[in-house]
Amino acid sequence: MDTEWKGKSRGSVLGYKIFVFLIKKVGLSAAYLILYFVAIYFCVFSISSSKSIYYYLHKRLGHNKYKSIVKIFRSYYVFGQTIIDKVAISSGLRNKFTYTFDGVELINEALRQKKGGILISAHLGNFEIAEHFFGELEENASISILTTNTEHTAIKDYLESVMQKSAINYIFINEDLSHIFEINAALARNEIVCITGDRYLEASKYLTQDLLGQEARFPSGPFLLASRLKVPILFVYVMKETNTHYHLYARKAKAKQRDAKGLLKEYTESVQWMLEKYPLQWFNYFDFWNVKNK
């Protein structure tokens, strides 16, 4: 299995075009139907990622071998659904879905402090549609997402051409650390900065913490940065519950300032809580626990 995340996701422009056509011309049900064949394809031909998700299901969650194999397909299928949903919602079909806002008042409370706020999420659920929840915020806050700039440009360009213009700003991680100045500027404007805390690139600095009973590596940057800034910190996840219903969870971090390790521990506890509720929505298809080299 792959021993680390490569910094970008898989897919092709043609695949996205097919699904966008189905969503717009036929409907979500047709796109979901085709997705069965896509999920089967990945089960058969994406051996490395399938091994990784099998390890997660069998060794970390404790499912038996048969159930773990079956759930590899279901994991790919749900992941595909979240991508389809993101395109559908961003293309003007938001009213086809329903939403539960669980803890959104904590984000509003943070914004009323006029310090901005840090939201830490993970690659589970469908955090990329979070901006459609943030329209409910009282303060009309601007959103910035800290991200790498390594995704396939052709896919990004195509999606931007078919989806409604996003109100989200992107802050790209740079080797010269200039992104830190952009984060501070956004917070000074009472904006929300969103960070994912569950993927690190090889050769970058990391912290270790147990997740589901096994030590794993997490990027040190998000936790060192967030713990040093005197702003509210929340853990936020957007989870798929049915074909057309999503649930946003926001929980306030309680770790002391400058305690990056404590913040990471609290974060992994929140991630584990989510995984126990939504085990199929863990979308880190690589050797997350670094078991190949042990």
Image: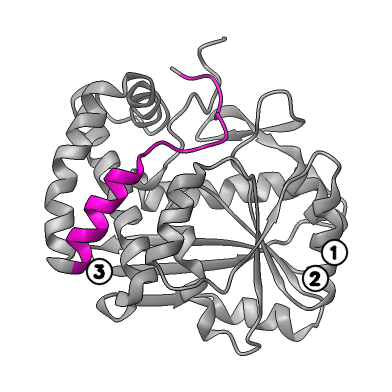
- Give the foreground label among 1 and 3: 1
Mark 2 crowdedness (10 Å alpha carbons): few <14, some 14-19, many ≥20:
many
What residue would you read off at disc 3?
A: 244
What residue would you read off at disc 2?
A: 187
Q: Give how far across and how far down residue 80 sits, in percent.
A: 29, 48
| Residue at point 34%, 31% (across, down) | 57
* Rendered-image quadrant of the C terminus: top right
Mark 3 crowdedness (10 Å alpha carbons): few <14, some 14-19, many ≥20:
some
Q: Is mark 1 in CB contact (under 8 Å) with mark 3?
A: no
Q: Give how far across and how far down residue 19 sits, in percent.
A: 24, 54
On the question of residue 265 being in view, the answer is yes
Sequence-earlier tag: 1 or 3 = 1
What residue would you read off at disc 1?
A: 184
Asked whether 21 falls inside the magenta stretch, the response is yes
| Residue at point 35%, 71% (across, down) | 91
Sequence-earlier tag: 3 or 2 = 2
| Residue at point 41%, 55% (across, down) | 158
Left or right, 114 with respect to 7, comes to right
Secondary element under disc 3, as helix, strand or loop, is: loop
